[in-house]
Image (spheres, rainbow, N blue to C red):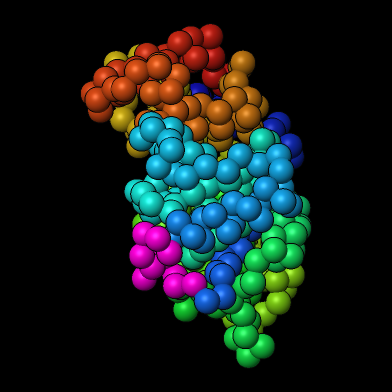
Amino acid sequence: MILNLEAGMLSKRTRDVPADGIAMSCRVRLARNLAGERFPDWATERDRERVFVKVRDALHAEAPGFLVEPVAAYEEQEREVLCEAHLISKDLLERAAGGGVAYAADGSVCVMINEEDHMRIQGFASGLDMQAAWQAADALDTRLERHLDYAWTPRLGYLTACPSNVGTGLRASAMVHLLGLRLQGETEAVVRSLERMRLLVRGIGGEGSEAAGQIYQISNMDSLGMDEQAIVQRVSRICAEVVRQERNARIRLIQESPLVLVDCLARSLSVLQNARLLATSEALEFLSAMRLGASLGLFTRMKVAEVDKLILMMQPGHLQKVSGMVLNPEERDEMRAEYLSRKMTNVKLKC
Protein backbone atom coordinates (compact mmCIF):
# COMPACT_ATOMS: atom_id res chain seq x y z
CA MET A 1 0.00 0.00 0.00
CA ILE A 2 2.79 2.43 0.91
CA LEU A 3 4.66 1.57 -2.30
CA ASN A 4 1.59 2.17 -4.44
CA LEU A 5 0.88 5.48 -2.73
CA GLU A 6 4.45 6.68 -3.22
CA ALA A 7 4.48 5.49 -6.81
CA GLY A 8 1.33 7.49 -7.46
CA MET A 9 2.73 10.65 -5.90
CA LEU A 10 6.03 10.35 -7.70
CA SER A 11 4.64 9.39 -11.10
CA LYS A 12 3.31 12.92 -11.51
CA ARG A 13 6.92 14.13 -11.47
CA THR A 14 8.20 11.75 -14.15
CA ARG A 15 7.56 14.15 -17.01
CA ASP A 16 9.26 16.98 -15.13
CA VAL A 17 12.56 15.31 -14.24
CA PRO A 18 15.06 18.02 -15.20
CA ALA A 19 18.41 17.55 -16.90
CA ASP A 20 19.56 20.84 -15.35
CA GLY A 21 21.81 20.26 -12.37
CA ILE A 22 23.10 16.85 -13.40
CA ALA A 23 26.09 18.59 -14.97
CA MET A 24 27.31 20.66 -12.04
CA SER A 25 30.17 22.60 -13.65
CA CYS A 26 32.78 22.38 -16.38
CA ARG A 27 36.37 23.45 -16.88
CA VAL A 28 38.82 23.85 -19.75
CA ARG A 29 42.51 23.82 -18.86
CA LEU A 30 45.40 24.81 -21.13
CA ALA A 31 48.92 23.61 -20.25
CA ARG A 32 51.62 26.03 -21.39
CA ASN A 33 55.40 26.21 -20.89
CA LEU A 34 57.99 28.88 -21.60
CA ALA A 35 60.62 28.27 -24.26
CA GLY A 36 64.14 27.87 -22.87
CA GLU A 37 62.99 27.13 -19.32
CA ARG A 38 63.16 23.76 -17.56
CA PHE A 39 59.86 22.12 -16.65
CA PRO A 40 59.03 22.82 -12.97
CA ASP A 41 59.88 19.33 -11.70
CA TRP A 42 63.35 19.57 -13.27
CA ALA A 43 63.93 23.23 -12.43
CA THR A 44 65.92 24.75 -9.59
CA GLU A 45 64.30 27.05 -7.07
CA ARG A 46 65.82 30.02 -8.88
CA ASP A 47 64.47 28.76 -12.23
CA ARG A 48 60.94 28.51 -10.85
CA GLU A 49 61.13 31.96 -9.27
CA ARG A 50 62.28 33.43 -12.60
CA VAL A 51 59.33 31.82 -14.40
CA PHE A 52 56.94 33.11 -11.72
CA VAL A 53 58.15 36.68 -12.25
CA LYS A 54 57.75 36.39 -16.05
CA VAL A 55 54.20 35.06 -15.75
CA ARG A 56 53.29 37.56 -13.04
CA ASP A 57 54.47 40.48 -15.19
CA ALA A 58 52.50 39.20 -18.19
CA LEU A 59 49.38 38.88 -16.04
CA HIS A 60 49.81 42.39 -14.64
CA ALA A 61 50.01 43.68 -18.22
CA GLU A 62 47.07 41.71 -19.65
CA ALA A 63 44.86 40.92 -16.66
CA PRO A 64 45.32 43.78 -14.17
CA GLY A 65 42.25 42.76 -12.17
CA PHE A 66 43.76 39.36 -11.29
CA LEU A 67 45.15 38.61 -7.85
CA VAL A 68 48.62 37.07 -8.37
CA GLU A 69 50.36 35.54 -5.35
CA PRO A 70 52.98 32.88 -4.58
CA VAL A 71 51.41 29.81 -3.01
CA ALA A 72 53.80 30.22 -0.08
CA ALA A 73 52.13 33.56 0.72
CA TYR A 74 48.96 31.72 1.78
CA GLU A 75 48.47 30.03 5.13
CA GLU A 76 47.88 26.27 5.01
CA GLN A 77 44.14 26.70 5.60
CA GLU A 78 43.87 29.28 2.80
CA ARG A 79 45.64 26.91 0.42
CA GLU A 80 43.14 24.18 1.29
CA VAL A 81 40.27 26.55 0.49
CA LEU A 82 41.81 27.37 -2.90
CA CYS A 83 42.28 23.65 -3.59
CA GLU A 84 38.71 22.77 -2.62
CA ALA A 85 37.48 25.54 -4.95
CA HIS A 86 39.59 23.95 -7.75
CA LEU A 87 41.69 27.11 -8.16
CA ILE A 88 44.84 25.16 -7.33
CA SER A 89 45.64 21.45 -7.42
CA LYS A 90 46.78 19.24 -4.54
CA ASP A 91 50.20 19.13 -6.19
CA LEU A 92 50.52 22.91 -6.27
CA LEU A 93 49.17 23.14 -2.72
CA GLU A 94 52.35 21.44 -1.48
CA ARG A 95 54.80 23.45 -3.54
CA ALA A 96 56.88 26.25 -2.06
CA ALA A 97 59.35 28.39 -4.04
CA GLY A 98 58.07 29.43 -7.43
CA GLY A 99 54.57 27.98 -7.12
CA GLY A 100 51.86 30.57 -7.62
CA VAL A 101 48.22 31.19 -8.41
CA ALA A 102 46.39 34.00 -10.18
CA TYR A 103 42.64 34.31 -10.49
CA ALA A 104 39.88 36.69 -11.48
CA ALA A 105 37.70 38.14 -8.74
CA ASP A 106 34.66 36.16 -9.95
CA GLY A 107 36.61 32.88 -10.07
CA SER A 108 35.81 32.34 -13.76
CA VAL A 109 39.47 32.10 -14.84
CA CYS A 110 42.63 31.20 -12.99
CA VAL A 111 46.27 30.37 -13.70
CA MET A 112 48.37 27.88 -11.75
CA ILE A 113 52.05 28.82 -12.00
CA ASN A 114 54.82 26.22 -11.76
CA GLU A 115 52.61 23.24 -11.09
CA GLU A 116 53.48 20.34 -13.44
CA ASP A 117 53.79 22.91 -16.24
CA HIS A 118 54.84 26.55 -16.07
CA MET A 119 51.23 27.62 -16.55
CA ARG A 120 47.89 25.89 -16.37
CA ILE A 121 45.26 28.34 -17.55
CA GLN A 122 41.76 27.33 -16.46
CA GLY A 123 38.36 28.62 -17.52
CA PHE A 124 35.26 27.64 -15.54
CA ALA A 125 31.53 27.69 -16.32
CA SER A 126 28.37 26.35 -14.75
CA GLY A 127 26.47 23.35 -16.05
CA LEU A 128 27.74 22.03 -19.36
CA ASP A 129 28.60 25.39 -20.96
CA MET A 130 32.03 24.11 -21.98
CA GLN A 131 32.22 26.58 -24.86
CA ALA A 132 32.15 29.48 -22.39
CA ALA A 133 34.86 27.85 -20.25
CA TRP A 134 37.05 27.30 -23.31
CA GLN A 135 36.57 30.84 -24.60
CA ALA A 136 37.55 32.29 -21.20
CA ALA A 137 40.74 30.21 -21.02
CA ASP A 138 41.58 30.76 -24.70
CA ALA A 139 41.15 34.53 -24.48
CA LEU A 140 43.58 34.79 -21.56
CA ASP A 141 46.01 32.41 -23.27
CA THR A 142 46.03 34.62 -26.39
CA ARG A 143 46.69 37.76 -24.34
CA LEU A 144 49.52 36.18 -22.33
CA GLU A 145 51.20 34.92 -25.50
CA ARG A 146 51.86 38.54 -26.47
CA HIS A 147 54.37 38.70 -23.62
CA LEU A 148 55.56 35.10 -23.24
CA ASP A 149 57.46 32.86 -25.66
CA TYR A 150 55.74 29.47 -25.49
CA ALA A 151 57.49 26.13 -25.97
CA TRP A 152 55.93 24.99 -29.26
CA THR A 153 56.89 23.11 -32.43
CA PRO A 154 55.07 22.88 -35.78
CA ARG A 155 55.06 19.06 -35.64
CA LEU A 156 53.96 18.46 -32.05
CA GLY A 157 52.28 21.67 -31.02
CA TYR A 158 52.62 22.83 -27.38
CA LEU A 159 55.30 20.99 -25.39
CA THR A 160 54.31 19.84 -21.92
CA ALA A 161 55.87 18.04 -18.96
CA CYS A 162 53.53 15.06 -19.37
CA PRO A 163 53.48 13.47 -22.87
CA SER A 164 49.70 12.97 -22.66
CA ASN A 165 49.21 16.75 -22.78
CA VAL A 166 51.46 17.41 -25.79
CA GLY A 167 49.64 18.97 -28.75
CA THR A 168 46.92 21.36 -27.77
CA GLY A 169 47.71 21.05 -24.06
CA LEU A 170 43.96 21.12 -23.55
CA ARG A 171 41.96 19.20 -20.96
CA ALA A 172 38.18 19.69 -21.05
CA SER A 173 36.19 18.29 -18.14
CA ALA A 174 32.72 18.27 -16.65
CA MET A 175 31.60 17.49 -13.11
CA VAL A 176 28.45 15.36 -13.17
CA HIS A 177 26.18 13.97 -10.44
CA LEU A 178 25.20 10.37 -11.24
CA LEU A 179 23.32 9.09 -8.20
CA GLY A 180 20.38 7.92 -10.35
CA LEU A 181 22.66 5.60 -12.31
CA ARG A 182 24.22 4.39 -9.04
CA LEU A 183 20.83 3.52 -7.53
CA GLN A 184 19.98 1.65 -10.73
CA GLY A 185 23.28 -0.26 -10.59
CA GLU A 186 24.44 1.13 -13.95
CA THR A 187 27.38 3.37 -13.00
CA GLU A 188 30.14 0.84 -13.73
CA ALA A 189 28.81 0.15 -17.23
CA VAL A 190 28.73 3.88 -18.03
CA VAL A 191 32.27 4.40 -16.67
CA ARG A 192 33.62 1.47 -18.72
CA SER A 193 31.97 2.87 -21.83
CA LEU A 194 33.55 6.28 -21.26
CA GLU A 195 36.97 4.73 -20.75
CA ARG A 196 36.62 2.79 -24.02
CA MET A 197 36.08 6.17 -25.71
CA ARG A 198 39.35 7.34 -24.12
CA LEU A 199 37.82 9.59 -21.53
CA LEU A 200 39.13 9.82 -17.97
CA VAL A 201 36.66 9.36 -15.12
CA ARG A 202 37.77 10.64 -11.73
CA GLY A 203 36.27 11.72 -8.43
CA ILE A 204 35.27 15.16 -7.19
CA GLY A 205 38.87 15.95 -6.20
CA GLY A 206 40.32 15.22 -9.64
CA GLU A 207 43.32 12.95 -10.23
CA GLY A 208 43.63 10.13 -7.74
CA SER A 209 40.32 10.83 -5.99
CA GLU A 210 37.26 8.64 -5.62
CA ALA A 211 33.73 9.62 -6.66
CA ALA A 212 32.41 10.62 -3.23
CA GLY A 213 28.71 11.39 -3.40
CA GLN A 214 28.57 9.86 -6.89
CA ILE A 215 30.07 13.06 -8.32
CA TYR A 216 32.39 12.31 -11.24
CA GLN A 217 34.80 14.37 -13.31
CA ILE A 218 34.85 13.33 -16.98
CA SER A 219 37.67 14.60 -19.24
CA ASN A 220 39.58 13.82 -22.42
CA MET A 221 42.69 11.62 -22.41
CA ASP A 222 44.13 12.79 -25.72
CA SER A 223 45.47 16.22 -26.58
CA LEU A 224 47.43 15.44 -29.76
CA GLY A 225 45.92 15.08 -33.24
CA MET A 226 42.78 17.19 -32.71
CA ASP A 227 42.30 20.93 -32.57
CA GLU A 228 41.06 22.64 -29.41
CA GLN A 229 37.53 23.24 -30.67
CA ALA A 230 37.13 19.61 -31.73
CA ILE A 231 38.22 18.34 -28.28
CA VAL A 232 35.83 20.69 -26.49
CA GLN A 233 32.92 19.72 -28.75
CA ARG A 234 33.61 15.99 -28.38
CA VAL A 235 33.81 16.05 -24.58
CA SER A 236 30.75 18.28 -24.38
CA ARG A 237 28.76 15.98 -26.68
CA ILE A 238 29.67 12.82 -24.75
CA CYS A 239 28.96 14.46 -21.38
CA ALA A 240 25.56 15.56 -22.70
CA GLU A 241 24.83 11.90 -23.48
CA VAL A 242 25.85 10.92 -19.92
CA VAL A 243 23.47 13.59 -18.61
CA ARG A 244 20.70 12.10 -20.78
CA GLN A 245 21.38 8.62 -19.38
CA GLU A 246 21.32 9.93 -15.81
CA ARG A 247 18.01 11.69 -16.45
CA ASN A 248 16.55 8.48 -17.87
CA ALA A 249 17.84 6.55 -14.82
CA ARG A 250 16.03 9.00 -12.53
CA ILE A 251 12.81 8.61 -14.51
CA ARG A 252 13.03 4.81 -14.30
CA LEU A 253 13.81 5.07 -10.60
CA ILE A 254 10.57 7.00 -10.04
CA GLN A 255 8.54 4.64 -12.23
CA GLU A 256 10.00 1.29 -11.20
CA SER A 257 11.62 1.68 -7.76
CA PRO A 258 9.95 4.60 -5.94
CA LEU A 259 10.47 3.00 -2.53
CA VAL A 260 14.22 2.72 -3.15
CA LEU A 261 14.32 6.42 -4.01
CA VAL A 262 12.20 7.54 -1.05
CA ASP A 263 14.15 5.35 1.37
CA CYS A 264 17.45 6.81 0.16
CA LEU A 265 16.18 10.37 0.61
CA ALA A 266 14.53 9.72 3.98
CA ARG A 267 17.58 7.98 5.45
CA SER A 268 19.91 10.75 4.28
CA LEU A 269 17.72 13.53 5.66
CA SER A 270 17.37 11.71 8.99
CA VAL A 271 21.12 11.25 9.38
CA LEU A 272 21.88 14.87 8.49
CA GLN A 273 19.29 16.09 10.98
CA ASN A 274 20.45 13.87 13.85
CA ALA A 275 24.13 12.89 13.43
CA ARG A 276 26.64 14.11 16.00
CA LEU A 277 29.76 13.27 13.99
CA LEU A 278 30.14 13.33 10.19
CA ALA A 279 33.31 12.76 8.19
CA THR A 280 33.68 14.59 4.87
CA SER A 281 33.03 11.45 2.81
CA GLU A 282 29.89 10.61 4.82
CA ALA A 283 28.54 14.14 4.50
CA LEU A 284 29.07 14.06 0.73
CA GLU A 285 27.18 10.78 0.39
CA PHE A 286 24.16 12.10 2.28
CA LEU A 287 24.27 15.51 0.59
CA SER A 288 24.34 13.67 -2.74
CA ALA A 289 20.95 12.17 -1.92
CA MET A 290 19.68 15.59 -0.80
CA ARG A 291 20.82 16.99 -4.13
CA LEU A 292 18.92 14.32 -6.04
CA GLY A 293 15.78 14.95 -3.98
CA ALA A 294 16.09 18.71 -4.39
CA SER A 295 16.45 18.37 -8.17
CA LEU A 296 13.23 16.33 -8.23
CA GLY A 297 11.42 18.86 -6.03
CA LEU A 298 10.90 16.28 -3.28
CA PHE A 299 12.19 18.37 -0.38
CA THR A 300 10.70 21.48 1.14
CA ARG A 301 13.05 24.45 1.65
CA MET A 302 15.98 22.89 -0.18
CA LYS A 303 17.20 23.81 -3.67
CA VAL A 304 20.01 22.28 -5.73
CA ALA A 305 22.10 25.48 -5.49
CA GLU A 306 21.86 25.35 -1.69
CA VAL A 307 23.06 21.75 -1.60
CA ASP A 308 25.99 22.64 -3.88
CA LYS A 309 27.03 25.36 -1.44
CA LEU A 310 26.84 22.87 1.43
CA ILE A 311 28.97 20.35 -0.50
CA LEU A 312 31.71 22.98 -0.78
CA MET A 313 31.25 24.26 2.78
CA MET A 314 31.68 20.76 4.23
CA GLN A 315 35.24 20.45 2.89
CA PRO A 316 37.87 20.72 5.67
CA GLY A 317 39.38 24.02 4.52
CA HIS A 318 36.06 25.81 4.07
CA LEU A 319 34.72 24.42 7.34
CA GLN A 320 37.69 25.80 9.26
CA LYS A 321 37.40 29.12 7.45
CA VAL A 322 33.78 29.42 8.62
CA SER A 323 34.72 28.55 12.19
CA GLY A 324 37.70 30.89 12.21
CA MET A 325 39.71 28.17 13.96
CA VAL A 326 42.15 25.40 13.17
CA LEU A 327 40.30 22.17 13.98
CA ASN A 328 41.53 18.61 14.34
CA PRO A 329 39.67 15.89 12.39
CA GLU A 330 37.30 14.96 15.23
CA GLU A 331 36.45 18.61 15.89
CA ARG A 332 35.74 19.07 12.18
CA ASP A 333 33.46 16.01 12.17
CA GLU A 334 31.54 17.39 15.13
CA MET A 335 31.22 20.87 13.65
CA ARG A 336 30.20 19.45 10.26
CA ALA A 337 27.39 17.42 11.82
CA GLU A 338 26.20 20.37 13.92
CA TYR A 339 26.27 22.75 10.94
CA LEU A 340 24.32 20.38 8.69
CA SER A 341 21.81 19.59 11.43
CA ARG A 342 20.99 23.30 11.71
CA LYS A 343 20.64 23.63 7.94
CA MET A 344 18.27 20.65 7.76
CA THR A 345 16.04 21.57 10.73
CA ASN A 346 13.05 22.72 8.69
CA VAL A 347 13.58 20.50 5.63
CA LYS A 348 10.90 17.87 5.05
CA LEU A 349 10.39 15.09 2.52
CA LYS A 350 7.22 15.64 0.51
CA CYS A 351 6.40 11.95 0.02
Which residue lies most toward the bottom here?
155
What is the quadrant of the C terminus in the image? top right
Residue 327 seen in this snapshot: yes
> Residue, x 37% and y 14% (percent of image)?
338
> 8 above or below 71?
above
* Closer to us: 228 or 43: 43
* Closer to us: 39 or 344: 39
* Closer to us: 278 or 159: 159
Q: Position of residue 240 (x, y in %)?
A: 68, 57
195 with respect to 325 (left or right):
right
> Residue, x 66% and y 42% (percent of image)?
66
Q: Position of residue 70 (x, y in %)?
A: 47, 45
Residue interval drawn in magenta: 37-47
> Residue, x 45% and y 19% (percent of image)?
322
> 182 above or below 152?
above
Q: Quadrant of residue 168?
A: bottom right
169 with respect to 339 (left or right):
right
> 348 above or below 280?
above
Q: Position of residue 127 (x, y in %)?
A: 68, 46
Q: Quadrant of residue 137?
A: bottom right
